Image (cartoon, grey):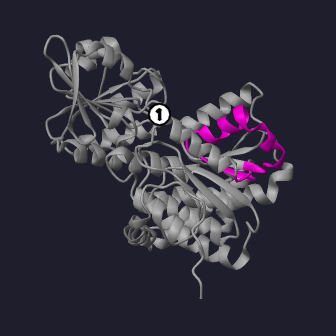
């Protein structure tokens, strides 16, 4: 029996497929909710004939999502959502073991990155899956002829949801998008526990730093910032939080962290981490104030949170001292170390979130795609929340996979909560 030819692709090395295969299998072991969805999808084929273009971090967990969508009948193409986040062995296995086209190479330059996005759009998708909204943006700016055939899409991360809501407010968004990031079973776990652990993992792999005793500055106290602050504190660091939102700053204070302006924190920090979703959070005046040996990292989606051009201009020299570590020497002799080119450090220098937490995120992705396919005629070109029943289903299945049982309301309790007449 002849072996099927590999699909069109642009990957680093086909010979990495065997390594990627075993790593995808290992991640699948930790993704029981997605396994259950895949089993149902195989039987029901709810995505039969649907073309999906997915612009996601090409990791072992993403591979299992792509396989699940394919097994549900979808025709899937994958490209990278970040130039440094691709796991080349995973890309090779998706192409050669699962016959899913992939356009992604770790370390690709900006031109190649966007050429890969355009390759994914040549698939003429009916559904888009985004992590950062670059795919949607490319459609709106360079591929508007695709819009009539689009049923909808999904968005994985905070930064992408912010961009999509801006598009919707300006009337630029032309098809419905489900904000997977905003599901409770996504951001309360993926953003907090996943980012918290994987960010520190990436920093430790890149630097071999000991967190105990460090002054760690966490810029931003959203769910990702909360997770990083919690984990750094757990490793013995003195954690300082900077914020622009007074409510979050108050919360960080009551969670036991020091809160201060970044101008002050930048003088203290041994390690400064940005997780805001905004640009130029760390900029020229902060580099000027930093102590000798300060380490700077980003775990927000885009590499704009650190003003790297300003750092380049301020430095008298630059050299690579370790993989994913660039040393900038300032005119006064101070050295500042930038990790992972300012890109997502958890994916640039490590493997991203553990599969057990991505299980819930990608379960939401798969079920949200199914929802869009079934309900697209009723959806308008705006950003939608994940339906509560999907969120609750993911939570219930996750608990069951962990062997955890919970209580149910009695009939009397349900009636009491649904009424208003019974008081004191």
Q: Residue 160: horizontal and vertical position, in percent?
A: 58, 37
The part of the image, by quadrant, that contains residue 248 is top left
Left or right, 263 with reference to 107: left
Q: Which residue is mark 1?
A: 302
User: Which corner quadrant holds the N terminus?
Assistant: bottom right
Report the magenta residues as a range. 123-152
Left or right, 138 with reference to 185: right
Q: Residue at x 27, y 42 (%)?
A: 203
The number of callouts visible is 1
Q: Is residue 147 magenta?
A: yes
Left or right, 301 with reference to 136: left
Q: Nearer the viewer, residue 306 or 371?
A: 306
Q: Residue 147: horizontal and vertical position, in percent?
A: 80, 42
Q: Residue 207: horizontal and vertical position, in percent?
A: 20, 41
Q: Is 254 placed above or below 112 here?
A: above
Q: Is residue 3 visible?
A: yes
Q: Is 58 placed above or below 217 here?
A: below
The part of the image, by quadrant, that contains residue 396 is bottom right
Q: Is residue 405 visible?
A: no
Taking the view exactly as shown, the residue that stands out farthest to the right is 377
Q: Nearer the viewer, residue 68 or 225?
A: 68
Q: Is residue 31 magenta?
A: no
Left or right, 52 with reference to 327: right
Q: Residue at x 39, y 65 (%)?
A: 16
Q: Residue 174: horizontal and vertical position, in percent?
A: 78, 37
Q: Residue at x 35, y 41 (%)?
A: 345
Q: Nearer the viewer, residue 378 or 120?
A: 120
The part of the image, by quadrant, that contains residue 368 is bottom right
Q: SS for tag 1? A: loop
């Amino acid at each position: 029996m002849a072996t099927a030819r590999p699909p069109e692709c642009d990957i680093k090395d086909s010979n990495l497929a065997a390594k990627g295969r075993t790593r995808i299998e290992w991640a699948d072991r930790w993704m029981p909710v997605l396994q259950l969805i895949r089993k149902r999808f195989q039987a029901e084929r709810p995505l039969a004939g649907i073309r999906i273009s997915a612009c996601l971090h090409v990791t072992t967990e993403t591979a299992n999502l792509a396989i699940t969508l394919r097994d549900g009948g979808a025709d899937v193409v994958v490209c990278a959502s970040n130039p440094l986040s691709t796991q080349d062995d995973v890309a090779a296995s998706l192409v050669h073991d699962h016959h899913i086209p992939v356009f992604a190479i770790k370390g690709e330059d900006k031109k190649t990155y966007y050429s890969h996005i355009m390759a994914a759009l040549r698939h003429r998708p009916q559904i888009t899956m985004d992590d950062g909204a670059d795919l949607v943006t490319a459609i709106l700016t360079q591929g508007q002829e695709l819009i009539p055939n689009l049923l909808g899409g999904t968005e994985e991360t905070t930064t992408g949801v912010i961009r999509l809501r801006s598009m919707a407010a300006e009337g630029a968004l032309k098809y419905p998008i489900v904000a997977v990031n905003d599901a409770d079973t996504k951001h309360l776990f993926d953003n907090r526990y996943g980012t918290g652990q994987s960010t520190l993992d990436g920093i430790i792999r890149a630097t071999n730093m000991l967190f105990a005793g460090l002054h760690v500055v966490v810029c931003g106290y959203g769910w990702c910032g909360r997770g990083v602050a919690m984990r750094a504190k757990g490793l013995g660091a003195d954690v300082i939080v900077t914020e622009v939102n007074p409510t979050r700053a108050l919360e960080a204070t009551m969670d036991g962290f020091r809160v201060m302006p970044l101008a002050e924190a930048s003088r203290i920090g041994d390690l400064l981490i940005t997780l805001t979703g905004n640009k130029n959070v760390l900029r020229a005046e902060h580099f000027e104030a930093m102590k000798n040996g300060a380490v700077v990292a980003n775990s927000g989606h885009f590499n704009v949170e650190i003003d790297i051009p300003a750092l380049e201009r301020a430095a008298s020299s630059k050299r690579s001292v370790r993989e994913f570590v660039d040393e900038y020497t300032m005119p006064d002799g101070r050295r500042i170390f930038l990790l992972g080119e300012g890109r997502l450090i958890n994916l640039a220098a490590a493997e991203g979130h553990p599969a057990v937490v991505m299980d819930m995120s990608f379960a939401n992705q798969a079920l949200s795609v199914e929802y869009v396919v079934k309900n697209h005629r009723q959806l308008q070109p705006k950003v939608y929340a994940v339906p509560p029943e999907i969120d609750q289903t993911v939570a219930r299945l996750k608990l069951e996979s962990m062997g955890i049982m919970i209580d149910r309301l009695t009939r009397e309790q349900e009636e009491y909560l649904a009424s208003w007449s019974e008081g004191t």
